[in-house]
Image (tube, rainbow, N blue to C red):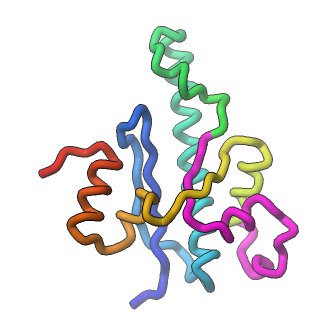
Amino acid sequence: MNRRSITSYCFLFNRNLISWNSTFQHTVALSSCEAEYIALKEASKEAIFLSGMLKWLENKLENKLKLLEDISPSKTVPILTDSQLAMKLGENPEFHKKSKHIDITYHFIRKCISEEKVKLIFVRTTEQLADGFTKGLNKTKHNALIEGLNLQKP
């Protein structure tokens, strides 16, 4: 057992899954809050990449593709999380007591929030689609994940 947590995220565009990841974190997190915080940093990096890709597409297509109007690259990308502590840690740099041991590279999420590139939104664990990539699922939860990601049932 390597004791490393799993980072997972998924991004939907017009209800279609366009990007996902599920991988072991590079470091051992000392708490579940830290593990969630590290995952938020990774999701933020992907959100910025996808936003840039949409901007590039929009420029290449010269606004001919109307479905990009709803999700403009200049808009803040919402990232759903079920960890209120990780949200507070990302939004409040004064939350020092709980975070002084966390490597500075993981505080990238704070910059993304302050520059309004991403916005953290709390969702209940039962509604968190990315959890399906990190946990064992019973049939009901598996079917809910497939439906939530708008995938085809086998």
Q: Residue furthest right?
A: 94
| Image mark count | 0
Residue 140 is left or right of residue 119, and the answer is: left
Q: Position of residue 50 (x, y in %)?
A: 52, 38
- Residue 91 forms part of the magenta stretch: yes
Q: Quadrant of residue 135?
A: bottom left
- Name the one closer to the observer, 81 or 134: 81
x and y percentages locating residue 86 in the rendered image: 66, 68
In the figure, 63 relative to 104: above or below?
Answer: above
What range of the chain is rendered magenta?
A: 77-105
Quadrant where the N terminus sits is bottom left
Q: Residue at x 24, y 71 (%)?
A: 138
Q: Is residue 59 left or right of residue 148?
A: right
Picture coordinates of residue 64 (x, y %)? 47, 9
**Rendering quarter of residue 59:** top right
Where residue 31 sits: x, y (%)?
A: 61, 83
Q: Nearer the viewer, residue 57 or 68?
A: 68
Identified at 65% across, 53% down, the residue is 120
Q: Is residue 45 above or below residue 8?
A: above
> Looking at the image, which residue sits at the far bottom?
1
Q: Residue at x 45, y 62 (%)?
A: 8
In this picture, is 118 found above or below 144?
A: above
In the displayed orientation, state which residue is furthest to the left.
Answer: 154
Report if residue 85 lies within the magenta region. yes
